[in-house]
Image (spheres, rainbow, N blue to C red):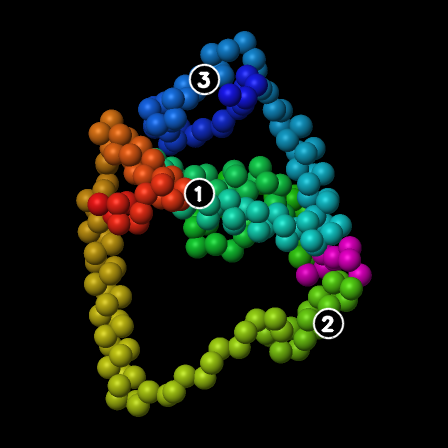
């Protein structure tokens, strides 16, 4: 094995079932650092200082701003596709707090971002004109300004692909499709309401040991499949 050492793994209360899982599956025992003599204290003053530095870097160079936005989105996508997604669920994450920890100037446009996440997010105190943030690379900035000028004239960003023309539908069919769409929308709304009513008052379901063991087996099989130690047919069985 390698040299002995320690690492810190931040876990949310909603991720607590990962502790017994990693112990069972990887034989790694996690210890609560709060029970040790070490302390991690981050004052509000220090937090604001760090955020100001991160915000200023992005305001000076759009490339850094873009990277921050992409990094956050990539993080969320990776989390949603985690092998242990039964234990680690994206909907449980405080996305606003996580975006703050990235030092983002704004929350990315994502369907996962809910109103409560916007309340959690701490961005710059001053209002920012995001179109005015330049690239430090002169050639890239010149290209951006040209596109921005075209966008102001046409309302369409030049790099975006134009939608293909769709063959028009006869009026009678269009009317019927519209009515069908309304009916489907109504049914979805009723179904959603029924589910919401059924879930009221329920607490987060605890993951059983049996489910943890089953998940551990699945993860182990997936690893074997990736390393080509077993075939897809064996994996499916």
- Secondary structure type for disc 3: loop
Query: Spatial distance from mark 2 to mark 1, Cα to Cα?
Result: 37 Å
Q: Does the residue at mark 2 contact the one at mark 1 (Cβ under 8 Å)? A: no
Residue 90 appearing in the image: no
159 or 183: nearer the viewer: 159
Residue 49 appearing in the image: yes
- Secondary structure type for disc 1: helix
Which residue shows up at 70% across the image and 33% down it? 49
* Magenta span: chief secondary structure: loop
Query: Would you name the residue on which mark 3 appears?
Result: 32
Name the spot of residue 43 as percent of width and height, x first: 62, 24
Residue 2 figure quarter:
top right
The stretch of residues the image draws in magenta is 131-138
Which residue shows up at 72% across the image and 59% down it? 132
Query: Would you name the residue on which mark 2 appears?
Result: 146
Residue ranking furthest to the right = 138
In the rendered image, the quadrant that contains the C terminus is top left
Mark 3 / mark 2, whichever is N-terminal: 3
Tell us which disc is closer to us: 3 or 2: 3
Answer above or below: position of 176 versus 94: below
Residue 100 figure quarter:
top right
Question: Within 10 angstroms of label 3, few (less than 14), some, or many (20 or more) residues?
Answer: few
Q: Does the residue at mark 3 contact the one at mark 2 (Cβ under 8 Å)? A: no
Name the spot of residue 9 as percent of width and height, x first: 49, 27
Query: Spatial distance from mark 3 to mark 2, Cα to Cα?
Result: 54 Å
Residue 192 figure quarter:
bottom left
215 or 151: nearer the viewer: 215
Query: Spatial distance from mark 1 to mark 3, Cα to Cα?
Result: 23 Å
Tell us which disc is closer to us: 2 or 1: 1
Query: Would you name the residue on which mark 1 appears?
Result: 79
Mark 2 / mark 1, whichever is N-terminal: 1
Name the spot of residue 71 as percent of width and height, x first: 57, 47
């Amino acid at each position: 094995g390698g040299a002995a050492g320690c690492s810190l793994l931040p876990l949310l209360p909603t991720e607590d079932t990962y502790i017994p899982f990693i112990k069972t599956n990887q034989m790694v025992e996690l210890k609560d650092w709060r029970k040790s003599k070490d302390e991690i204290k981050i004052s509000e003053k220090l937090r604001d200082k760090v955020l100001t530095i991160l915000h200023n870097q992005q305001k000076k160079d759009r490339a850094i701003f873009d990277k921050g936005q992409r990094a956050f989105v990539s993080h969320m996508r990776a989390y949603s596709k985690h092998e242990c997604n039964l234990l680690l669920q994206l909907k449980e994450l405080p996305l606003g707090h996580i975006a703050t920890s990235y030092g983002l100037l704004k929350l990315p446009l994502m369907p996962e971002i809910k109103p409560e996440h916007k309340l959690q997010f701490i961005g710059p105190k001053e209002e920012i004109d995001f179109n005015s943030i330049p690239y430090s690379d002169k050639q890239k900035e010149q290209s951006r300004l040209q596109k921005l000028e075209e966008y102001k004239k046409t309302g369409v960003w030049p790099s975006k692909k134009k939608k293909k023309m769709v063959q028009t539908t006869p009026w009678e069919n269009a009317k019927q499709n519209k009515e069908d769409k309304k009916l489907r929308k109504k049914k979805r709304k009723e179904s959603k309401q029924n589910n919401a009513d059924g879930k009221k008052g329920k607490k987060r379901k605890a993951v059983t040991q049996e489910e943890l063991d089953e998940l551990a087996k699945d993860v182990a099989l997936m690893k074997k499949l990736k390393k080509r130690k077993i075939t897809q047919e064996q994996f499916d069985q």
